[in-house]
Image: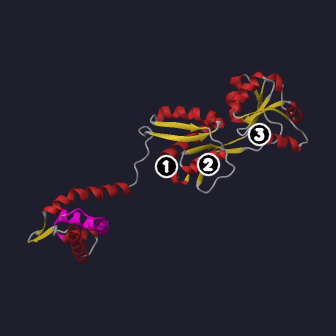
Amino acid sequence: MSDISDNELRRLDLTLLLVFLGLMRHRKSTDVARELGLTQSAISQALRRLRDIFGDELFLRRPHGLDPTAVALRLEPALARAVQALRGALADPAPFQPETTWRVIRLAALDAEQAVLLPGLIRDLAASAPGLQLSVRPLARREAMEALIAGEIDLALGFFWSAPDSLIAAPLYRQDFAVAGQAAVLGQGDLTPAAYAAFPHVLVSPAGDLRGIADEALAALGLERRVVAALPAFLPALAAAAEAPVAVTLPRALAEGFAPRFGLVTRAPPVALRSFAVTALRHRRNEHDPALLWLIDRLASAASSDNS
């Protein structure tokens, strides 16, 4: 038998392979027809097609049934492996086992999510999934979504006003704000809008903006604050507040978790600042990725525990 051409391979459908393997097992076409739910005529037609494709009789009729030829005997192992490989490819995937999976998960997260979510996640990975590695990039919202669409990252953590239909958002927790500063600066008791506006402020803005949502809330009351610096990350802003008489407005989870480490106190903002949802964003191509679903579940559980 010569090498099979692409044109001949195109003619070799799965039913033909199943008929061939059935005849190798049973050596009787009636048994194969019963096993596959086909008519005797369909088995005969399939055998004619097989003989034409492979250029060999394949099975010789004998009084006791069908005897395979040397070509059929040589084909059987390879065709059996091909059918078994196809069965394996179409079967349900093995359940995700974090303790035995080796993989790099590529994340995008700015410093707030890095500081609040990732320490606990890294602790959990060390205990439950030692073969999973995190590769984190500090991408802002638009850049993170573009990286997801391009396939450069697997997950993006943070606050996204809107996302294209190609991305799926999994809510992790809702977040509001707090004000951090030295006790001597913020004073005792609740802040008033006038006192809050009177403080010098450090604003956190990855883009370097000198206005934020607090300025909009103050403007609605006829007040204005003085921003002395715009920094791209929250932890440097807290470090600045530890050294200078300034106030920093930041997500409450970050304030409560890190302000005391800088010797700072926190207060509730005296103006209405909208809360926001922190989500894990992934591309629809990874909608059913078991490793990402497991990771999102761990993030959501940790966030629920920390914010309860």
Query: Disc 2 on helix, strand or loop?
Result: helix
Q: Position of residue 273 (x, y in %)?
A: 79, 42
Query: Disc 3 on helix, strand or loop?
Result: loop
Would residue 25 be counted in the magenta stretch? yes
Choose the circle earlier in sequence order: 2 or 3. 2
From the image, which quarter does the C terminus lie in?
Answer: top right
Local crowd at mark 3 within 10 Å, few (<14), some, or many (≥20)?
A: few
Report which quarter residue 187 is drawn in: top right
Choose the circle earlier in sequence order: 1 or 3. 3
Q: Which residue is the extreme one toward the right? A: 222
Residue behind mark 2: 145
Q: Position of residue 278 (x, y in %)?
A: 65, 43
Query: Disc 1 on helix, strand or loop?
Result: loop
Disc 1 vs disc 2: Cβ atoms closer than 8 Å? no
What amino acid is labelled 2 in the image?
Met
What amino acid is labelled 3 in the image?
Asp
What amino acid is labelled 1 in the image?
Asp
Foreground disc of the pair 1, 2:
2
Q: Nearer the viewer, residue 153 or 87?
A: 153
Local crowd at mark 2 within 10 Å, few (<14), some, or many (≥20)?
A: many
Disc 1 vs disc 3: Cβ atoms closer than 8 Å? no
Q: Which residue is the extreme one toward the bottom? A: 41
Establish if 111 lies above or below 96: above
Q: Position of residue 16 (x, y in %)?
A: 27, 68
Disc 2 vs disc 3: Cβ atoms closer than 8 Å? no
Number of numbered discs on residues = 3
Residue behind mark 1: 289
Report the disc number at residue 189. Answer: none
Report the disc number at residue 209. Answer: 3
Give the residues drawn in magenta, as a range: 2-28
Establish if 218 lies above or below 81: above
